């Protein structure tokens, strides 16, 4: 017998007991009538106790059996009721003249009623007691037919056997049902979903045990409560509309909603509920909700959203979120949108010299300063690297230039990083306008920012249409240069380099020109800067180097040297040494006849790397010259560290060397420095006899300029090689 009864079991027991009580009452009252009308007069007094017993058993049907039968002792004691019925029945049958006839039906009825409640052993025991009572009755009724007795006993035995089998099967079915219910209960208890049945009035009729896991309530705590009493006030109107629509929907229709319900501890759970209209089902008559806690998923989605739209280093909006808000802002016709694009100047030096950790610390500090100087409604974002942006949807009378100036001021303030104070500057581009797309506005701000960076840095620039026209022109020039490089429109001219005392032609400098199909012959000032920015300078410089080497080989003039300029982009190119090696090998020239010219600024960007590259070039056998010496950071230290052979004095010091004492003194110092370091000196831009005479008196080794010859084609240089001093050739 199970120790615990669920609601279903308690209802079943209470129902069977009430049925048994009513049947027992009717049987007892029939017995009282039998005594009253059939028994002899001196025994009719038995009718009164039978009447009382019958009415008492009937009254027992009204007792709270549903609550009592939950106690195992009460259920065990009920067996005595059935057991007592049989001796009482046998006693009455013993004195009744027809006792043998009515005993067996009544006894079988008792056994059959026991089948519905008790186990097979109890039913079999009651059957055995009933048959024993019948055997005892036969002694009081000697005239009973043997055939009748055998038939009645056989019927009684069959009833007892069948009842025992039924009781056994019922018990097995009950055990299977309880096992299935336990499994179902365990599944529901451990299920991440809660199933709740909501009645027509919004009251909770049923909730699965898993509600304790999800919301912290016991199922009994929520039964008969209103669903609305758990709902978040902010979600309640929407939840009521959803429930009303679901109730009014077709039978079996489903709908989904995400809402918040209060947990037992007072916190709010974010739940996803799928409702099914089962009001038409007579077994349910409810709206069935399948509820799942999605708080963890929502938190993860928010975290992923933050990661997707937030810069992990600074906590600012990232490029994706900035572009999204920019598109939304520009899509509104009435919006006045302004974009500030901020790029830190020379931030790469911080990473290279102090490490990326210091760079990250600097970015974090500067981001915090920017955040303090923009309104909460503005969008401040880190677009990547050292680039930030501010989106302002309404300036509200403010001046964008004043805001840019304030941001520049804040960024200039010292930042303590890695034990030292760093000062950082920035270039800011400002763009605004109506009717522009987000991409166009960002492009304009980008153009303005690069204009500020090209102009002076540590400044801001407001976008104007001329900037866009400049970019278009640069793009067109870049395209034309690509076509020119593929179509052999470039050519190389050569300017003589002479020995100062004798004016003997000792070398030439290769200078590139562009034979433009529309604009004619263009000097380097028209295209070199664009080539440098676009990267075309690398293939162009490689072509010039190969042309110069092949031309030197074609002249086949002993001792003639070829000077070739290298750009900053070329010098940083990893394949430079291989390009020089291949040019020498293909042309077959003596490497010592090739001089590569570099500017001071190129070498000082990264002096260690520069020294390695120069050493690799020196191992090829070429000579190295510092061009425009004196215009950069002229330092004895780097001259000592770098394996250079030649100092080329910039034309800025040559122009007035014959008339200005300071320029003469500076040139004299450079010449003396070259002699002390055993470096050859070359003066550039010599145009007058006085300049030549002065430089010769100062001891300068070589010179070049219009006095000795302009940049010329190979044929002209070849004539100069055969006719004597370059100056006389030029004059002729």
Image (spheres, rainbow, N blue to C red):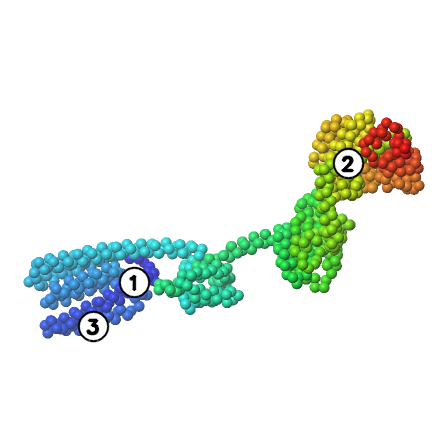
Q: Above or below — where is 424 with respect to 219?
A: above
- Badge 1 element: helix
Q: Residues within 10 Å of mark 3 (few under 14, many from 20)?
A: some
- Badge 3 element: helix
Residue 6 or residue 568, whichever sits in front: 568
Residue 164 or residue 537, whichever sits in front: 537
- Residue at 14 percent of width and 57 percent of height: 154
Q: Earlier in the sequence, mark 1 or mark 3?
A: 1
Q: Which residue is mark 2?
A: 491
**Left or right of residue 668: residue 418:** left
Q: Residues within 10 Å of mark 2 (few under 14, many from 20)?
A: some
Q: Are marks 1 and 3 in contact (CB under 8 Å)?
A: no
- Residue at 42 percent of width and 59 percent of height: 195
Q: Are marks 1 and 2 in contact (CB under 8 Å)?
A: no
Residue 237 in sight: yes
Separation (CA) of disc 1 from disc 2 = 109 Å
Q: Above or below — where is 123 with respect to 721?
A: below
| Callout count | 3
């Amino acid at each position: 017998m199970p120790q615990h009864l669920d609601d279903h079991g308690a209802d079943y027991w209470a129902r069977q007991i009430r049925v048994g009580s009513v049947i027992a009452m009717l049987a007892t009252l029939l017995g009282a009538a039998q005594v009253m009308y059939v028994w002899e007069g001196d025994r009719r007094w038995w009718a009164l106790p039978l009447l009382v017993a019958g009415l008492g058993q009937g009254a027992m049907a009204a007792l709270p059996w549903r609550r009592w039968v939950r106690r195992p002792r009460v259920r065990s004691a009920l067996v005595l009721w059935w057991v007592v019925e049989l001796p009482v029945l046998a006693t009455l049958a013993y004195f009744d003249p027809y006792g043998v006839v009515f005993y067996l039906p009544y006894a079988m009825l008792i056994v059959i009623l026991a089948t519905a409640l008790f186990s097979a052993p109890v039913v079999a025991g009651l059957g055995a007691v009933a048959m024993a009572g019948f055997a005892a009755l036969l002694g009081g009724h000697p005239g009973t037919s043997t055939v009748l007795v055998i038939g009645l006993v056989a019927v009684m035995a069959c009833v007892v056997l069948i009842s025992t089998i039924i009781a056994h099967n019922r018990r097995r079915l009950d055990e299977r049902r309880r096992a299935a219910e336990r499994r179902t209960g365990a599944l529901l208890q451990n299920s991440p979903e809660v199933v709740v049945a909501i009645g027509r009035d919004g009251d909770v009729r049923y909730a699965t045990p898993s509600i304790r896991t999800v919301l912290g309530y016991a199922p009994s705590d929520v039964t008969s409560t209103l669903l609305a009493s758990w709902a978040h006030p902010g979600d309640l109107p929407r939840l009521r509309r959803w429930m009303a629509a679901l109730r009014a929907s077709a039978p079996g229709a489903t709908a989904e909603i995400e809402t918040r319900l209060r947990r037992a501890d007072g916190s709010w759970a974010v739940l996803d509920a799928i409702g099914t209209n089962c009001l038409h089902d007579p077994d349910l008559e409810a709206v069935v909700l399948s509820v799942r806690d999605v708080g963890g998923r929502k938190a993860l989605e928010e975290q992923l959203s933050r990661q997707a739209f937030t810069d992990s280093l600074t906590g600012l909006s990232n490029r994706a979120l900035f572009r999204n808000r920019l598109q939304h802002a520009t899509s509104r016709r009435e919006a006045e949108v302004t974009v500030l694009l901020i790029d830190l100047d020379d931030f790469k030096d911080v990473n290279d010299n102090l490490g990326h950790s210091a760079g990250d610390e600097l970015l974090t500090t500067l981001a915090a300063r920017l955040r303090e100087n923009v309104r909460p409604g503005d969008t401040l974002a880190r677009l990547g690297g050292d680039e930030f942006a501010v989106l302002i949807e309404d300036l509200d009378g403010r001046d964008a230039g004043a805001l840019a100036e304030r941001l520049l001021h804040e960024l200039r303030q010292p930042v303590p990083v890695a034990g030292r104070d760093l000062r950082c500057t920035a270039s800011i581009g400002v763009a605004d306008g109506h009717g522009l797309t987000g991409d166009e506005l960002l492009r304009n701000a980008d153009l303005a920012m690069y204009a500020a960076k090209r102009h002076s840095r540590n400044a801001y620039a407001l976008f104007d249409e001329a900037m866009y026209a400049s970019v278009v022109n640069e793009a067109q020039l870049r395209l034309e240069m690509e076509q020119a490089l593929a179509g052999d429109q470039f050519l190389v001219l050569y300017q003589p380099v002479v020995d100062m005392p004798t004016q003997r032609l000792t070398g030439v400098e290769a200078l590139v020109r562009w034979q433009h199909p529309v604009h004619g012959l263009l000097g380097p000032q028209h295209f070199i800067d664009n080539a440098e920015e676009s990267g075309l300078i690398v293939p162009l410089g490689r072509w010039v180097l190969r042309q110069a080497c092949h031309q030197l080989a074609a002249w086949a003039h002993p001792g003639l040297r070829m000077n070739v300029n290298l750009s900053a982009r070329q010098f940083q190119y990893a394949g430079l040494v291989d390009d020089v090696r291949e040019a020498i090998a293909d042309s077959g020239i003596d490497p010592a006849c090739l001089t590569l010219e570099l500017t001071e600024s190129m070498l000082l960007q990264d002096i260690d790397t520069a020294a390695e590259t120069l050493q690799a070039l020196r191992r090829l056998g070429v000579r190295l010259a510092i061009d425009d010496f004196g215009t950069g950071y002229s330092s004895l230290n780097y001259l000592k560290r770098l394996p250079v052979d030649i100092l080329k004095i910039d034309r800025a010091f040559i122009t007035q060397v014959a008339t200005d004492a300071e320029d003469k003194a500076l040139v004299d110092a450079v010449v003396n420095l070259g002699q002390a370091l055993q470096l050859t000196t070359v003066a550039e831009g010599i145009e007058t006899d006085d300049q030549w005479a002065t430089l010769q008196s100062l001891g300068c080794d070589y010179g070049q300029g219009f006095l000795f010859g302009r940049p010329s084609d190979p044929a002209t240089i070849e004539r100069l090689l055969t006719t004597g001093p370059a100056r006389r050739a030029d004059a002729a």
